[in-house]
Image (cartoon, rainbow, N blue to C red):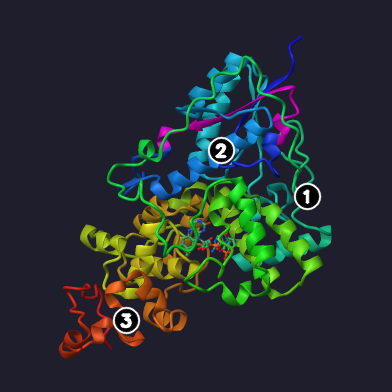
Amino acid sequence: MSEPTSLAWFRRDHRLHDNAAFAAACDADRVVPVYCVDPREYGDRPFGGPDSFDFEKTGAHRARFRLESLADLRASLRDRGSDLVVREGRPESVLPEVAAAVDADFVTVHTRPTPEESRVESAVETELRDGGVELRRFWGHTLTHLDGLPMALSDLPDTYTTFRKAVELAAEDAGTGDAAAGDEHASDGDPGGRDPLPEPTVPPLPDDAPDAGDLPAVSDLVGTADANADRAPDDRGVLPFDGGETAALDRVESYIWAGDHLREYKEARNGLLGADYSSKFSPWLNEGCLSPRYVKAEVDRYEDRRVENDSTYWLVFELRWRDFFQFQFAKHGSDCFHREGIRERTDIDWRRDDAQFERWAAGKTGIPFVDANMRELNATGYMSNRGRQNAASFLANDLRLDWRRGAAYFETRLVDYDPASNYGNWAYIAGVGNDSRERSFDVRWQANRYDEDAEYVKTWLPELDALPAEYAHEPWKLSGAEQASYGVELGVDYPEPMVDFSD
Ligand SMILES: Cc1cc2nc3c(=O)[nH]c(=O)nc-3n(C[C@H](O)[C@H](O)[C@H](O)COP(=O)(O)OP(=O)(O)OC[C@H]3O[C@@H](n4cnc5c(N)ncnc54)[C@H](O)[C@@H]3O)c2cc1C
């Protein structure tokens, strides 16, 4: 009888630590790690559904980050005598071919709750089944395991606070919380759910494995219109964001331990400039280079060794927000992408105005706080949480432009894009999400509160450098004579505001 053979299908879980799917694949004697560059994840795509529009699925920032993550994963696997087989093509075509070539018995993968990802999994499962190969699914991208939820998915609260309290209570009762008895998504039983899993012993790549293949270049994946493709990192950016598990673990080490930033995270997290006002873990979490359970274990260790305070609690509180959106999408499915949202609100008159949308996207609204944030996003792929809230609220609540176009623009640009976190937050701010409270932001008030001396705005809008802070946030208040004396002419050096904020 031949030795059991598995394929480890990597898909936004580009790590060896705490990787339940890969650990299960490594139970076989022969393991072939595979990654599919799915053409559906790149290029211009229709949003789908009524009032669809086209947008680029993945921009240069995330494409670069992903390719670096894959290169890092491949290097780690090679160090262990294995490799990462990379193929361009749809997983439902590629995986059955590779499985047949090495006579695989099963394929492991981390499942995702969002509709596009689920559809691909189902297609893969069907094609594999036809060839007598089993797809084994694991749940591994949240802090609380799906099976560790203290309620059925259909009973999941639609407000965060109710969800959080229930999960925190269950965590206390369980001692560590975030536990799962097993994994329904794994037919052979997932040991995961409690503490992060150790890295498995990786079997060497079988001799009959196909050629590893080359990783594509960024320019193979993103449109030529994406001017950022080959740009060096902007030195105003918060971090260079190197992709991969190695850089992810380095960031945890430097943020939590060397920098000791969990002493003040709760107070600092509304910052706008610099590497350390918040953890910046999001790109690594979303591309799967970093496990949220690993982060939680590091926070626990920090509490044991250094200090337990509001900040240590708050980082986990934020990770639970991330979980909340994942489970919301598991519960509500494609409704989360509807313009009317899960609350089916039909009372909002969403507008379409391409010229206004382009001004917002380019950071040329004439509202400096919005523009600075959009320019940071365009140049670096990152924007602070404070910035995202304001930029999104301006589009959805002040301009009343279809919030899904804004969300889709973020999807293209963000280095840390995740469907549930992105569309969930956007829907929430647009008032169609999981909270009936008014979520509109007063961007002028926010600018003065969070960028008091206008340092952030001037970093990204150097044309406003000569202005005192008050005017840098509200240049429409400048008289003609003041414009002349500061050398900033509205409509020439910086745009006139798109909305009338004079009161
Ligand atoms: C309109 C809008 C769109 C967003 N799109 C995304 C997205 O595509 N991907 C994404 O990861 N986050 C998104 N967020 C949430 C949040 O802005 C980012 O997670 C955060 O800014 C990342 O920086 P950080 O890692 O330093 O966060 P920290 O403050 O250090 O938080 C730690 C981690 O908690 C999680 N987290 C924090 N806040 C949220 C939140 N509101 N929702 C979900 N998770 C959260 C993230 O995983 C983050 O890495 C969005 C927020 C808004 C308002």
User: Between marks 3 and 1, how big is the CA–CA gap?
Assistant: 50 Å
Assign a secondary structure to mark 2.
Answer: loop
The type of residue carrying mark 3 is Ala
Which label is found at residue 11? Answer: 2
The type of residue carrying mark 1 is Arg
Residues shaded magenta: 23-40
Give the mark nearest the N terminus, 2 or 1. 2
Give the mark nearest the N terminus, 3 or 2. 2
Q: Is mark 1 within 8 Å of ligand 1?
A: no
Task: Tell me, yes or no, whether the two marked residues, 2 and 1, touch with CB atoms within 8 Å.
Answer: no
Left or right side of 57 for 244? right
Left or right side of 126 for 146? right
Q: Is residue 503 above or below residue 435?
A: below
User: Between marks 2 and 1, how big is the CA–CA gap?
Assistant: 22 Å
Q: Quadrant of the C terminus?
A: bottom left
Q: Is residue 90 above or below residue 317?
A: above
Residue under pointer 3: 472
Residue under pointer 1: 194
The x, y position of residue 494, in whole percent, is: 22, 73
Give the mark nearest the N terminus, 3 or 1. 1
On the question of residue 347 being in view, the answer is: no
User: Between marks 3 and 2, how big is the CA–CA gap?
Assistant: 44 Å
Mark 3 crowd level (few <14, some 14–19, many ≥20, 10 Å Cα) = many
Q: Residue furthest top?
A: 1
